[in-house]
């Protein structure tokens, strides 16, 4: 028999940088032992069996031979059948060892069995699945655990990977072919249903029809035939089925669940599934083990504020930003809420908290459908919450995200609260009381168990619309202490739930004085997005009653998920997914494409002109026509005329209402572009769409009017933009991008965007006045708004940093320059190309980020304290962010030598090499670009000995090569100051002890063994410094006698020897010069004698 050498066998595909895998080494060692048996038995089958049985009699021999045969079956496809036959012959434990090893391999090593980013599955992976299939055919006990481990390796939302699709397809085929065996595995059945029901939602594309049909058939068969096993999934089964109920294979099953539930083992209705809590194992199963490990690392090992780099890596690793990749995010949110419950010690620490991770994942979603699915995953446990049976940890992330977002990200708070209330009202029409009750109990438990102090921080926030605040008071009555507002009786009736013995009733509300009518200010209209959250749902979007055949879909919540950015009426909401009765003759897969651009709301076909704008209805209709036809010239003229007309309306109230209505109309036309992806910040892209992109065109028109028009028209432009901002917080973000990046790319001139940005500033100032924040520190308010827009822009595309920041830093110089929040955000969003662009701008003086250059030139007081505060804060940042910060320092300080002399001595206090190596590297980088003045060199000699080499010597060595004369002069002056000679008052700060100076120089001398070039530069500097200074040499001798440190004495001896070597070289050089001079003189005299002799001879 021909054998394959073990050296050519590999179980795992490791790279050069990967450490050796222990399991692989053990298996390969056992396989080499098996090869020896096969070689010396000369292909004698009987002899091989005898040898194998003898090996199995030894201690651990059976385990080693089983591992060897498994390794052969997986790694050597040509002999896999033979190895399997040998395995059947020697096994004596019912394949227990085999199953245990295969489970470990499938759980921990499956990704490593293939090359990174491989296009196809590897031979090892295919053979592993072949072995599992053979064991399933044998009905080996425990092989179901291996199947569960393999199911976990299928990543949701990843249809791009051929390996992922291959594993999905082959496991589905295995279970279809082995259905008799599968029906006997009570633990495996619900996991198979849960996995493939979830994965079927990802395969909407027609090219995956065959796989989707196979998944649908398998899931429907399992649910119908094995309902008692599938029922243990509980409420999660409903959430998954609602995502696939429009797929033809699932339509019949969903209709039977709604209309004929009795056929499923006595189920009365769908609420029976709501009552069953989903076991944690199912939530964990939708994350691969590697994915789970990396997500836990972020939440258990990374401190708050330093997670950006890890989050970006996680997003890239698992394709969250790829088309369709955000379908994985709901699985991550369900895992975080329902499975990962950290200890109190972690909750009290400064590690990254769950609510922060959920908020980050919510921001990763790109389409309204994905946003709705993520929010549903976040609030799903709230709907059915019972304090007796459910854990408060399931609802803690959403509660904390709501309350912690109030100071800086209020739009998130409002959006989540509106979605939660819409979910309670519209998720299940016959169970609305039960859903509201569940949300009430969840909110109450958060307060009673100390997750949050109260819900008053939401109900009393003045920036939140009064209607939503009233809903919070009514829904969470009794848990908003300190709220001075009364609870209206009609609000309690509208938003409360009826007490029912079946649900245990509702807690008695706290005694408050009721009022007969909820009062709202007439001049403060209700927020359209609040009205949208309760009016934009049609009957087909709700969870139907038992008699209805329509379906549950997360798209029912899309109107709420986009409510914060979608202000229009119900007719402009995200189109609902059509029910089965409307899909005849249409493509079945049309409705569940997760990354389709159609998810973004489209503008209405007809403008609903408010009464207050009837006077300019003709202009608005022309504006609508220009918008529909994409006619930029007509659109520009119509919009300009409409704004000027509204600006001259008579009557303050009429004009105010008209401006708000005008903002509503304009926002309706361009909102799909505001909510959509930003334009790529390139000249080609901007040039291509600058006239066709209505958002870009509208903002340019408003900005132009605000700059060139008369005062009334200028104010009208600002007020229209402000009314748009009140309806959609992304308006300011898009405006900032348009006026900075787009105009910069269009004109190629930074001044063009700088001239346009005052309009953006006025918008932020108007927003502060409208939100009653004008009495606060104006710079702080503007900074919070800037940071909000920066986060949105930079999260969309890191390239935006380089094009947006320079003009903004000039317009908001007093806010941006030196701001710890801005610098930290920018540092965390850099790519190599954007960092290069920013450093170029800083070096050329086109922008300021760390220092105000006027302050550096005039040496104004206080600037260095602000910088030191920034450095102290940066010590808590990620190392990559700190490196970027120090590069900013170096680029800006390169042109301000006097500022370096002032700042570096203070920066050295942070330079503790062991604790903060980034500071040490940053200081050395600044010193390397500066000149060795006395003020800069002196403080180096006062550093502790631990920093001599990393800071002092490295800087002195560079200066000795580049600036030897200046360095020598500075050292001479320092020696004079250290001996008390000619000390000037202004030089007292740079004075250092003579002994410290000589010790550092001795250390410097010791560092240059076998470095002739740099030692030569050192010798030149020292020769100048010590020339004629015999007192310094005497001081050296005295120091050697007085020092007890042997190492220091050795260094001083080295310095003395080096200086002696310098003196001898200098003496030799002087002697050589004298000799050359004498020879030259002698040669000159000899030539003179010859000339005179010739002259005399001629005479």
Image: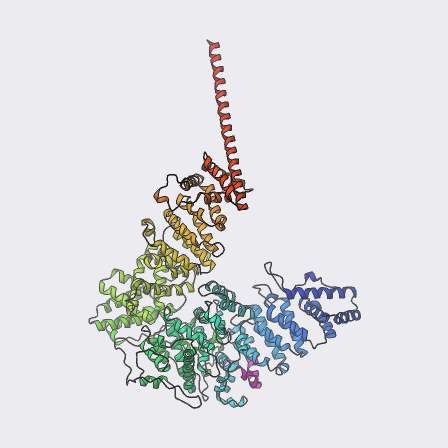
Secondary structure, magenta segment, majority class? helix
* Residue furthest top as drawn: 1099
Q: Position of residue 13 (x, y in %)?
A: 62, 63
Give the x, y percent position of residue 152. 57, 73
Looking at the rendering, which quadrant does residue 568 occupy?
bottom left
Q: Nearer the viewer, residue 84 or 337?
A: 337
Foreground residue among 991 and 248: 991
* Along the viewing direction, whichever of 712 and 877 lies nearer the viewer: 877
Considering only vertical position in the picture, is 499 above or below 690? below
Residue plotted at (64% across, 72% down): 102
Residue 1026 spot, x, y in % from top left? 46, 37
Q: Is residue 1001 above or below residue 890?
A: above
* Residue plotted at (61% across, 78% down): 175
Q: Is residue 839 visible?
A: no
Quarter where residue 985 is shown: top left
Would you say 561 lies left or right of 651 here?
right
Q: Could you tell me if residue 54 is visible in this image?
A: yes
First to last magenta residue range: 217-235
Q: Position of residue 907 (x, y in %)?
A: 41, 53
The residue at the far left in this view is 650
In the image, residue 229 lies in the stretch drawn in magenta: yes
Quadrant containing the N terminus in the rendered view: bottom right
């Amino acid at each position: 028999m021909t054998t394959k050498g073990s050296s050519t066998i590999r179980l795992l595909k490791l790279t050069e940088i990967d450490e050796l895998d222990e399991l692989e080494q053990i298996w390969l060692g056992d396989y080499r032992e098996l090869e020896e048996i096969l070689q010396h038995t000369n292909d004698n089958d009987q002899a091989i069996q005898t040898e194998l049985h003898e090996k199995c009699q030894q201690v651990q021999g059976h385990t080693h031979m089983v591992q060897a045969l498994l390794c052969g079956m997986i790694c050597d496809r040509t002999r896999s059948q033979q190895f399997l036959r040998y395995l059947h012959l020697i096994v004596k434990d019912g394949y227990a060892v085999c199953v245990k090893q295969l489970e470990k391999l499938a759980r921990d090593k499956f990704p490593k069995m293939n090359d990174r980013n491989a296009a196809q599955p590897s031979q090892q992976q295919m053979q592993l699945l072949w072995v599992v299939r053979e064991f399933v055919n044998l009905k080996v006990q425990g092989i179901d655990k291996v199947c569960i481990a393999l199911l976990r390796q299928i990543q949701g939302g990843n249809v791009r990977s051929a390996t992922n699709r291959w594993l999905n397809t082959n496991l589905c085929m295995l279970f279809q072919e082995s259905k008799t065996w599968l029906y006997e595995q009570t633990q495996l059945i619900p996991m198979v249903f849960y996995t493939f029901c979830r994965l079927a939602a990802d395969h909407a594309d027609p090219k995956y029809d065959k796989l989707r049909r196979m998944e649908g058939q398998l899931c429907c068969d399992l649910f119908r035939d094995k309902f008692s096993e599938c029922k243990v999934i509980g409420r999660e089964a409903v959430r998954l089925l609602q995502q696939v109920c429009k797929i033809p294979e699932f339509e019949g099953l969903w209709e039977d669940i709604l209309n004929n539930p009795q056929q499923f083992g006595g189920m009365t209705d769908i609420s029976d599934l709501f009552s069953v809590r989903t076991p944690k194992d199912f939530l964990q199963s939708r994350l691969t083990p590697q994915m789970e490990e990396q997500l836990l690392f972020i939440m258990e090992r990374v401190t708050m504020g330093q997670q950006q780099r890890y989050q970006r890596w996680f997003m890239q690793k698992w394709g969250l930003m790829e088309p369709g990749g955000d379908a994985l995010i709901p699985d991550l949110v369900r895992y975080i809420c329902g499975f990962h419950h950290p200890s109190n010690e972690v909750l009290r620490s400064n590690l990254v908290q769950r609510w922060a991770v959920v908020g980050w994942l919510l921001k990763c979603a790109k389409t309204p459908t994905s946003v709705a699915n993520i929010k549903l995953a976040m609030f799903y446990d709230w709907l059915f919450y019972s304090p007796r049976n459910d854990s408060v940890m399931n609802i803690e992330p959403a509660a904390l995200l709501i309350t912690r977002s109030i100071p800086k990200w209020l739009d998130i708070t409002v959006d989540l609260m509106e979605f939660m209330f819409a979910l309670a009202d519209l998720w299940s029409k016959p169970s609305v009381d039960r859903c509201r009750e569940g949300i009430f109990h969840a909110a109450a438990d958060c307060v009673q168990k100390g997750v949050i102090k109260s819900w008053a921080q939401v109900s009393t926030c003045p920036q939140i619309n009064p209607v939503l605040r009233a809903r919070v008071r009514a829904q969470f009555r009794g848990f908003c202490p300190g709220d001075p507002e009364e609870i209206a009786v009609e609000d309690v009736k509208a938003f409360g739930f009826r007490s029912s013995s079946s649900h245990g009733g509702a807690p008695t509300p706290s005694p408050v004085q009721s009022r007969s009518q909820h009062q709202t200010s007439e001049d403060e209209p209700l927020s359209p997005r609040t009205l949208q959250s309760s009016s934009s749902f049609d009957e087909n979007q709700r969870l139907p009653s038992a008699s209805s055949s329509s379906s549950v879909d997360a798209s029912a919540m899309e109107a709420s998920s986009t409510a914060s950015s979608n202000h229009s009426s119900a007719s402009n909401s995200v189109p609902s997914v059509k029910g089965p009765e409307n899909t005849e003759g249409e493509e079945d897969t049309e409705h569940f494409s997760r990354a389709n651009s159609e998810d973004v709301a489209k503008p209405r076909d007809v403008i609903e002109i408010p009464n207050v704008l009837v006077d300019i209805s003709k202009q608005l209709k022309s504006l609508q026509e220009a918008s529909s036809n994409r006619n930029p010239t007509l659109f520009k003229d119509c919009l300009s005329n409409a704004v000027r007309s509204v600006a001259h309306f008579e009557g303050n109230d009429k004009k105010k209402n008209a401006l708000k209505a005008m903002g509503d109309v304009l926002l309706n036309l361009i909102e799909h572009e505001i909510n959509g992806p930003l334009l790529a910040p390139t000249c080609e892209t901007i040039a291509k769409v600058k006239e066709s992109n209505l958002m870009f065109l509208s903002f340019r028109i408003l900005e132009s009017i605000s700059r060139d028009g008369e005062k009334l028209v200028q104010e009208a432009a600002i007020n229209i933009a402000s009314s748009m901002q009140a309806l959609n917080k992304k308006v300011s973000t898009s405006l900032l991008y348009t006026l900075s990046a787009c105009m910069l790319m269009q004109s190629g001139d930074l001044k063009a965007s700088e001239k346009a940005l005052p309009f953006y500033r006025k918008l932020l100032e108007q927003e502060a006045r409208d939100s009653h924040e004008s009495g606060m520190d104006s710079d702080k308010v503007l900074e919070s708004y800037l940071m909000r827009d920066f986060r949105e822009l930079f999260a969309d595309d890191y390239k935006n940093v380089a094009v947006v920041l320079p003009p903004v830093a000039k317009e908001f110089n007093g806010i941006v320059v030196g701001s710890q929040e801005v610098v930290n955000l920018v540092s965390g969003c850099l790519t190599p190309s954007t960092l290069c662009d920013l450093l170029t701008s800083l070096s050329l003086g086109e922008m300021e980020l760390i220092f105000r250059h006027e302050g550096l030139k005039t040496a104004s007081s206080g600037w260095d304290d602000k910088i030191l505060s920034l450095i102290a804060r940066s010590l808590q940042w990620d190392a990559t962010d700190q490196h970027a910060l120090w590069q900013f320092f170096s680029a800006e300080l390169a042109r301000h030598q006097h500022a370096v002399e002032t700042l570096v001595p203070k920066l050295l206090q942070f330079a503790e090499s062991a604790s903060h190596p980034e500071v040490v590297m940053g200081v050395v980088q600044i010193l390397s670009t500066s000149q060795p003045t006395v003020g800069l060199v002196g403080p180096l000699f006062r550093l502790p000995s631990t920093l001599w080499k990393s800071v002092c010597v490295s800087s002195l060595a560079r200066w000795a090569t580049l600036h030897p004369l200046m360095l020598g002069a500075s050292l001479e002056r320092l020696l004079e100051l250290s001996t008390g000679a000619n000390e000037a008052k202004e030089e007292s700060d740079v004075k250092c002890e003579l002994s410290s100076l000589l010790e550092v120089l001795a250390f410097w001398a010791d560092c240059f063994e076998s470095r002739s070039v740099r030692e030569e530069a050192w010798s030149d500097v020292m020769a100048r410094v010590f020339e004629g200074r015999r007192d310094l040499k005497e001081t050296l001798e005295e120091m050697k006698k007085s020092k007890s440190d042997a190492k220091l004495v050795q260094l001083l001896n080295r310095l003395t020897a080096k200086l002696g070597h310098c003196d001898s070289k200098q003496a030799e050089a002087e002697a050589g010069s004298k000799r050359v001079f004498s020879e030259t003189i002698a040669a000159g005299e000899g030539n003179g004698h010859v000339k005179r002799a010739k002259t005399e001879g001629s005479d």
